[in-house]
Amino acid sequence: MSALFNRFSKCQLSTNQLILLVALYFTLVFNFPFLKEVTTTVLSLEKFNLLFLATVPIMAFNLCTILFSLFSARPILKPVLIGLTLISSLVFYAKVSYGVVFDYGMIQNSAQTNTAEAMSYLNWHVAAFSLFTGVLPATFILCVKVQQYPRIKSLISRIKLITISLLSILIIAAIFYPNYASVGRNNRHLQKSSIPFPYLVDSFKYTRDHYFTEPRSFKVLDEHPTLDSAGDGQKKVIVMVVGETARAQNFSYNGYAKPTNQATEKFGLISFEKMFSCGTATAVSLPCMFSTLTRSSYDELDAEYEQNLLDLVSLAGVDVLWIDNNGCKGVCARVPTINIDVKSNNPLCDGEYCFDEVLIEPLQEKLAHLSAPTTLIVLHMIGSHGPTYFKRYPSETRPFKDDCQRSDIQNCSPESLVNTYDNTIAYTDLVLSEVISSLNALPQSVQPSMLYVSDHGESLGESGAYLHGFPYAFAPEEQKHIPLLAWFPEHRSPYIDTTCLQNRAKKDTFSHDNIFHSMLGMLNVHSTQYDKSLDMFASCMTPQIQEGMRLTRVNN
C-alpha cells in the first residue's frame, strides 16, 4: 500500500488536468450504466441517429468538467473530488448491483435509516467494489501533486476550461436538441440514472426541505371527530398489522404456487388481490397510508404537520397503541407507543433486529387489559426487509430450505433468493396466525378483527432490479403491488357482510388511498375527513350498521 502511495505521489498534474481526468473517470466508469441504458433506448427506436448517440458521453464529460471546475479553489478541490468519488462509488454499486436509482425518495431513505439497517448492506462484495471504484481513485486524488500557478493565470485557465466545455454543450444542443428532448421526455428514468447530478440535486432538495424551511404549525383537520361505540355493550378491538417489503405475488392467497400462507389458511382471511402502495419505500408509504392524502397529492411535509389517522381516532375516543419493530417514520409521534428493544435479552432479538414474533407478547398484554369501548392496536413489522432476508425468520421456521444466507443478494441463485424471500412471507403468515389466535381467545363480549397491509413491494432480480425504492413512475410492478388481508370472524363480526367483501376484494382495485377512510369506517369514527367512496368496507356493511352510520353523520 505504501508503494502505491509513493507511486501516486510522484504524479504531477495541473488543476485542469486533474479535473479532466476525474471527469473522464466519472464518464467512463460511474456513468457506464447510464450510457448503456441510453444506448439500449436509442437503438430500440425505429429510427435513430448514431451521431446523437456518440455525443452523449461527450455531453456527460463536459457537464462533469464544469461541475468540478466550480470547486477548483485549492483548499476545496481535493476534498470535493474525493467526497464525490467515494459517494458516487456507493451509488454506482447500488445501480450496478441492485438497479437502484438515487432520487429524492432514496436520499430520504438513506437519511432516515438506522445503523442496523445500514450495516445490513455491508458485505465483502460491496467492500471490494468500493475499494477498486472509490477508495483507490480517491487515494490517487489525495496523493497526486497539483502544480501551483499564479492566481490570475489559474483563474484564466479555469475560465477557458469552463468556456470550452460550455461551447461544446451548446454546439451539441444546437445540433441534436430534438433528439435529447425526445429521448429525455419519453424515457424519464434516464434523467435519474446519471452520476453525480441527480443525487446531488435531490440531496440539495432534501436538505433544503428538512433543514432550511420555515417551521410549520400543526394542522388540525377535524377538531371534533366522534366515536359511535356499539350500543350492545360489546367492545371492539382492531389490530392493524403493517407489513414491510411484502409483495402480493408471493402470497398463496393471490395464486402463488408455493405454500407461503399455510399458517393462516384455516382462519378464512380475505385477500384484496388488486392492492397497490402509495410509494415504493417505507418513508413515503407509511406516512401516506395513515394520512388523508392520496398518492397523487402526497406531500411529505403536509403529512408530517397535519392530523393523521391515529391522531384523529384517538381524539374521537379510540384507545390507540402502536407496537413498533421497524420505526414509525413519525406516524406514531402523538399516540402511546411501545418500541421493541433490539438489545434486550429476548431470545427473539440479536442486538440488531428482532423477529416479528416479539410483537405478540405486548399485543397479548394489551388485549388482557382492554378498557375502552373501541381499541386500535397497530403492529409494525420488520417483515421481509432486505437485503438480509435470511435474518427475518428463525431457521427452524423456514419451509423452503434451499435459501440464500448472504446480503449480496445479486450473487444468490434466483431460486435460492426467492426461497429466502418466501421464508419471510411464510414467517409473516405465522405471526399473523398468532395475532388471530390471540384475538380469538378474547371473551365473546369483544368484537375482534385484523387488517394486514404491506407498505410496499420488492424486486428480486426481475429485469435486473433488486430491493425497492425506485421512482414510482417507472418502478416495476413487484414494488407497487402489495398484499392486503382482512380477518372478520363471521360469528363475531355482525357489522360486515364477508361474502360481499370477498367479491369486492377479488374484482376491485384498491390502494393505500383507501386505508384512512376504511379504518375510520371499521372503527365507526365520524369525521369531516371521511370519504365513503374511498372506504373499502362501506358497501359491505350490514344494513343496520349503514343506517346507524348515516344517522349519526346526519346528526353531527
Image (tube, helix red, strand yellow):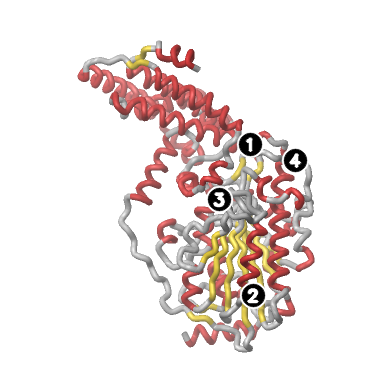
Identify the secondary structure beneath mark 4.
Answer: helix
Question: Which numbered mark, 1 or 2, is in the foreground of this view?
Answer: 2
User: Distance of mark 4 from mark 1, alpha carbons?
Assistant: 15 Å
Where is residue 223 shown, x and y percent of the image? 41, 76
Please give the residue where the numbered disc 2 appears in the rendered image. Answer: 368
Q: Which mark is residue 408?
A: 1
User: What is the three-letter code of the residue carrying label 4?
Assistant: Glu
Where is residue 140 shown, x and y percent of the image? 43, 19
Quadrant of the rendered structure where residue 326 is? Answer: bottom right
How packed mark 4 is, by other alpha carbons closer than 10 Å (few <14, some 14-19, many 20 or more), is: few
Please give the residue where the numbered disc 4 appears in the rendered image. Answer: 415
How packed mark 3 is, by other alpha carbons closer than 10 Å (few <14, some 14-19, many 20 or more), is: many
Please give the residue where the numbered disc 3 appears in the rendered image. Answer: 280
User: Distance of mark 3 from mark 2, alpha carbons?
Assistant: 36 Å
User: Distance of mark 2 from mark 4, alpha carbons?
Assistant: 43 Å
User: What is the three-letter code of the residue carrying label 3?
Assistant: Thr
Of the numbered discs 3 and 1, the one sitting upstream in the chain is: 3
Residue sitting at x 73%, y 69%: 437
User: Distance of mark 3 from mark 4, alpha carbons?
Assistant: 24 Å
The answer to whether 361 appears left or right of 531 in the picture is right
